[in-house]
Amino acid sequence: MPHQMSKDTIPVRKGEELDLAVLEQFLRSNIENLPNSPLELLQFSAGHSNLTYQIKIGEWEAVLRRPPLGPVAPKAHDMEREFKIISELHPVFSVTPKPILFSKQEEIVGSPFFIMERKNGLVIDTSFPEEIMVTKELCQQLSEVMVNKLVELHGINYKETGLGAISKPEGFIDRQVHSWLGRYERAKSDEIAAVESLKKWLSGNIPVQHTAAIIHYDFKFNNAMFNESLSEMVGLFDWEMTTVGDPLADLGVAMSYWNQADDPEELKKGLGKAPVTLNDGFFTRKQFIELYAKKSGRDVANMNFYLTFAYFKLAVICQQIYYRYKKGQTNDLRFAHFNYKAKMLIEHAAMVASGEL
């Protein structure tokens, strides 16, 4: 009998299978009162980085996250750190999944991993679920939900959580710029004409950071989950990049994913299908930023820098993924042309930096 799949899961991709017998024995040894049914495993289709699985035993469901296959960059894909983040955030930010357990035992799934609750709701990526009637009002409502949730996250007093202990708020954006410049150098493959001048511009225009907040740093629709009416966010996922840093850097990253109708065609479809924010009624980036500024009280005068840096970061992520593919560390064919995506994003970042967009 085939698996009964939810819309966000697929059968496990070849080469990314887990040993079900070993995993089930571990689960039964560490989690009480599991049903007597056999363990079932599916994989979440979204995401280009960590491997995320749905694990199911009878009526019990949870989510398992582990790093990607092959060697990973130092400090990247730190499962223990992400588990600490959601453990600190879940009590104060309800859309964070509830943590269940973390394990360093690499013999279970081949790496350290953690398990968290499986939330249920609607995920929007490049299109709406078929049962949703899309209207301008709905798109505006969703835009406001996204702004409100980002403002809420940035409004949490990080000093009342343990996140300050695993973060360095001072000098965040300066360190980030130089760190991502270095990451690009370590992963580059093709020569890109625009990159040298862009790197100099980024190094020479780093704004002074005035405030620090908890930042998600990958805030976008396909990392969020909503209730059936799409009036409320019920889940926010992929906390691996989270830290205490410059909230405007977080806003910049969110806006780098928030495409609008007048964007260049290659950007709108640069990472696959055109994003949902192209639908009539969604805020423009300018409207999103203005409402964020109004609700948060933050000065957004330097958003051009933060958006440029966010596009560059996205380019580096694509380049790192392509580098792993080229080195044979993943056989996921989705990644075969990510070098072209990296080039497109660098060229776009250079245009944003120059004020052309």
Image (cartoon, rainbow, N blue to C red):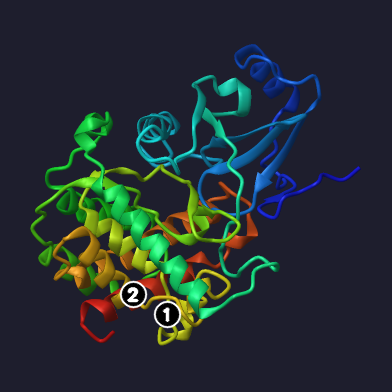
Question: How far is the residue under mark 1 from the one under mark 2?
Answer: 7 Å
Q: Secondary structure at mark 1?
A: loop
Looking at marks 1 and 2 on the same chain, the residue that comes earlier in the sequence is marked by: 1
Residue 157's x, y, as percent? Answer: 21, 39
Please, what is the three-letter code of the amino acid marked with disc 2? Arg
Q: Quadrant of residue 65?
A: top right
Foreground: 77 or 114? 114
Please, what is the three-letter code of the amino acid marked with disc 1? Gln
Position of residue 293 relative to residue 60, above or below, is below
Question: In screen coordinates, is 175 left or right of 38?
Answer: left
Q: Which residue is mark 1?
A: 260
Foreground: 49 or 230? 230
Quadrant assignment for the N terminus:
top right
The circle drawn on residue 285 is 2
What residue appears at the point 71 percent right and 22 percent down from the top-left corner? 24
Q: Let me know if residue 243 appears in the view.
A: yes
Q: Quadrant of residue 3?
A: top right
What residue appears at the point 50 percent right and 79 percent down from the top-left corner? 136
Label 1 crowd bin: few (<14), some (14–19), many (20+), radius 10 Å? many
What residue appears at the point 55 percent right and 68 percent down from the top-left corner? 337
Position of residue 178 relative to residue 25, above or below, is below
**Do labels 1 and 2 touch, CB within 8 Å?**
yes
